[in-house]
Image (cartoon, grey):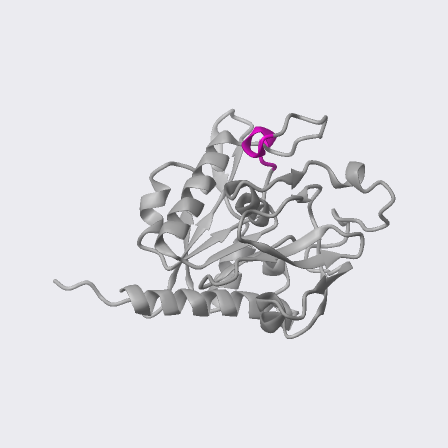
């Protein structure tokens, strides 16, 4: 029996890890990521925090790196500077780094969101700001907003010559924000494409790559109300479809 040909690209999605009240690890994902991928025409495939997920990624057509807890600073060559850590998971760190290396090897489209942009920095020997309030004590921006996730609260300036700007169709975008860490040193071959008003890096991209973009905000929570957020997912899924057509 022949295998039916897929008409939609498969998007492999990294997932969060936490220890439940019963002391059992749980992998999970907020459904807004699934909705955003489906809205853009893709099929979401969850990749659990196990080494075998890199094999599962090989049947996908794009990699989405999602938000979540902090990276262990030892992963980017730093010691603990006294940050109040948010959900560090060795299993998740190791799985995502394997997924990123696999995606690079396959020249597969990659999209990183919040922790996801940080994952791309760590994977490429970049580094992170361990705590934004400590590093930018005079900033008036609230990078971890109290407003609902679907409400943008601060402005980001996008490099007009960037791939990101061509996708968004604008050089100024208002975003939502739920993070206390951010990219400090970008990884090799990546370039910064967006900043917040206080100088915090809000986006980066990989030139001369089919689709390599990371953003620090959460467009998956904005797709139902904001065209710029939808366009990000549409562009990513379109790149995944092109990868699918070229390789399958």
State the quadrant of the N terminus.
bottom left
| The residue positioned farthest toward the bottom in the image shown | 169
Q: Name above or below for residue 58 compared with residue 9.
A: above
Residue 4 screen position, x and y as percent: 22, 66
Q: Let me know if residue 58 appears in the view.
A: yes
| The residue positioned farthest toward the front in the image shown | 189
Q: Is residue 241 magenta?
A: no
Q: Name above or below for residue 179 compared with residue 223.
A: above
In this rendering, would 155 be left or right of 125?
Answer: right
The residue under the point 49% across, 65% down is 236
Residue 146 screen position, x and y as percent: 77, 49
Q: Is residue 74 magenta?
A: yes
The magenta segment is 70-77
Residue 222 screen position, x and y as percent: 64, 63
The residue under the point 52% across, 26% down is 22
Residue 237 screen position, x and y as percent: 45, 66
The residue under the point 29% across, 64% down is 247
Q: Let me know if residue 217 appears in the view.
A: no
Q: Name above or below for residue 102 compared with residue 82.
A: below
Number of numbered discs present?
Answer: 0
* Residue 220, image quadrant: bottom right
Q: Name above or below for residue 5 compared with residue 178.
A: below
The residue under the point 75% across, 48% down is 143
State the quadrant of the C terminus.
bottom left
* Relative depth, front residue between 40 and 115: 115
């Amino acid at each position: 029996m022949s295998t039916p040909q897929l008409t939609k690209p498969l998007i492999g999605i990294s997932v969060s890890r936490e220890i439940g009240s019963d002391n059992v690890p749980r992998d999970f994902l907020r459904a807004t990521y699934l909705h955003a991928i489906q809205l853009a025409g893709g099929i979401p495939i969850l990749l659990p925090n196990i080494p075998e997920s890199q094999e599962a990624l090989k049947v996908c057509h794009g990699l989405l790196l999602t938000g979540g807890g902090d990276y262990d600073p030892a992963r980017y060559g730093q010691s603990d500077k006294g940050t109040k850590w948010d959900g560090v998971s060795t299993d998740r760190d190791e799985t995502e780094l394997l997924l990123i290396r696999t995606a690079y090897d396959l020249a597969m489209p990659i999209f990183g969101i919040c922790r996801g942009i940080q994952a791309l920095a760590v994977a490429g020997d970049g580094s992170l700001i361990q705590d934004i309030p400590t590093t930018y004590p005079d900033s008036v921006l609230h990078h971890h907003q109290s407003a609902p996730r679907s409400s943008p609260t601060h402005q980001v300036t996008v490099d007009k010559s960037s791939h990101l700007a061509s996708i968004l169709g604008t050089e100024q975008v208002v975003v939502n924000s739920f993070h206390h860490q951010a990219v400090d040193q970008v990884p090799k071959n990546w370039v910064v494409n967006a900043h917040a008003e206080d100088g915090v890096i809000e986006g980066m991209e990989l030139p001369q790559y089919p689709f390599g973009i990371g953003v620090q905000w959460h467009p998956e929570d904005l797709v139902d109300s904001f065209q710029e957020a939808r366009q990000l997912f549409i562009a990513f899924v379109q790149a995944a479809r092109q990868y699918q057509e070229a390789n399958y």
